Amino acid sequence: MRKGILAVVFLTAIFIANGQQKGIEIVAVPATNGIDSNCLLLNQCVYLTVRITNIDTLDFSDIPLSLEIHDNNGNLLIILYDTLWGVLQAGSSQQFTFTQCYVVPNLPAYFVIATATAGGNVYSDTLTECVDADDVALTKFINPTCDNFGSPGDIISLTVQLENHSPNKTYEEVRIYAYIMDGFETTVALVEIIPNIAQGVMNYTFTTRYMVPNAPSYSIKVFIESIDNYPLNDTLVCVSYPFPNKVSDYSRTDLSLGQNAPNPATETTRIDYKIPTHGEVVFYVYNMVGQIVYTETVEAVAGKNSLDLNTSGLVSGIYYYSMTFNGEKLVKKIVKH
């Protein structure tokens, strides 16, 4: 294909070199100015504009035009056809924009060849366009996965996969965010710094863990700060299916964890609970990042029991408390004022 390109350019050069300033001249207008800061975006739809000048003494009518996109090896990637309808009078010029766009290929740079046919001769112009290939994308959740979000009360080490598509750029000090939402509000907000993102694929695990909310379902939104021109792949969102109710699945009425009262709590709040037999019950209170801020183990009798929880040492905010009995774990939310 490169030989064919050179042949077209050579034909035009001979035609003018003989002193016969006849025919037309076509000039492709670049969509960029050729520097990296103004490169085209990958998959961008570009409508090529050309300037056509009649340098002949004769008029030309309905001039056929074509547009070719080639890679650096001369391989033809795209070809489009159009027509400049009407009469282009001798000595006049006209600007024309192709009615179809071409899609910017996934290459660092490419060649655009615009051609026009008049009086049985083919005239062409070639330009080079650059592509902005610098892009960091969030590609998928590693832990948890979108089909396995864990159960209420589970402590999760959130891990996501990123990919740096840039051919030669390493990104440093990239801020990454994670929002854990229980369907009503953001229960956990994580903000961390990724030291560097080199070319290729990498996994990042947040240093702070979170606890799965006690809610019918919850969602995770992870995103990175804007560092490139491709914002659509900077965010990951997953929404869990409703969690199974571990108590009602077995139609049990003898194991329950009540909502603390008063809620919001100030100094002390009472938690009622019920167990089927005498035994050991373990209580935990977690903050929004999954850290245990309170634990207590009690010997409880079969039936109704209560725990008076002193919350005076807790800062204001949202917490979760859990009760574990014989492998069954129940979780509730508590608000501290």
Image (tube, rainbow, N blue to C red):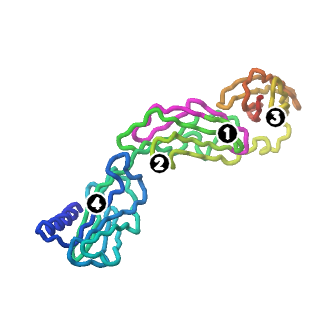
Q: What residue span does the magenta drawing correspond to?
A: 190-217
Q: Report how far apart the C-alphas of labels 2 and 1 lie in the structure.
A: 26 Å
Amino acid identity at mark 3: Leu
Question: Which residue in the protein does label 4 denote?
Answer: 75
Comes first in the chain, label 4 or label 1: 4
The label nearer to you, 4 versus 3, is: 4
For residue 216, above or below residue 55: above
Rendering coords of residue 192 (x, y %) = 54, 32
Residue that lies at the very extreme toward the top in this rendered image? 313
Q: Report how far apart the C-alphas of labels 2 and 4 lie in the structure.
A: 27 Å
Amino acid identity at mark 2: Tyr
For residue 192, above or below residue 295: below
Q: Report how far apart the C-alphas of labels 4 and 3 lie in the structure.
A: 69 Å
Question: Which residue in the protein does label 3 denote?
Answer: 257
Comes first in the chain, label 2 or label 4: 4
For residue 205, above or below residue 129: above
In the rendered image, residue 201 lying in the magenta stretch gets the answer yes
Q: Judge from the rendering whether residue 4 lies leftward or rightward of residue 282; answer left or right.
A: left
Q: Report how far apart the C-alphas of labels 3 and 1 lie in the structure.
A: 24 Å
Question: Which residue in the protein does label 2 denote?
Answer: 230
The label nearer to you, 3 versus 1, is: 1
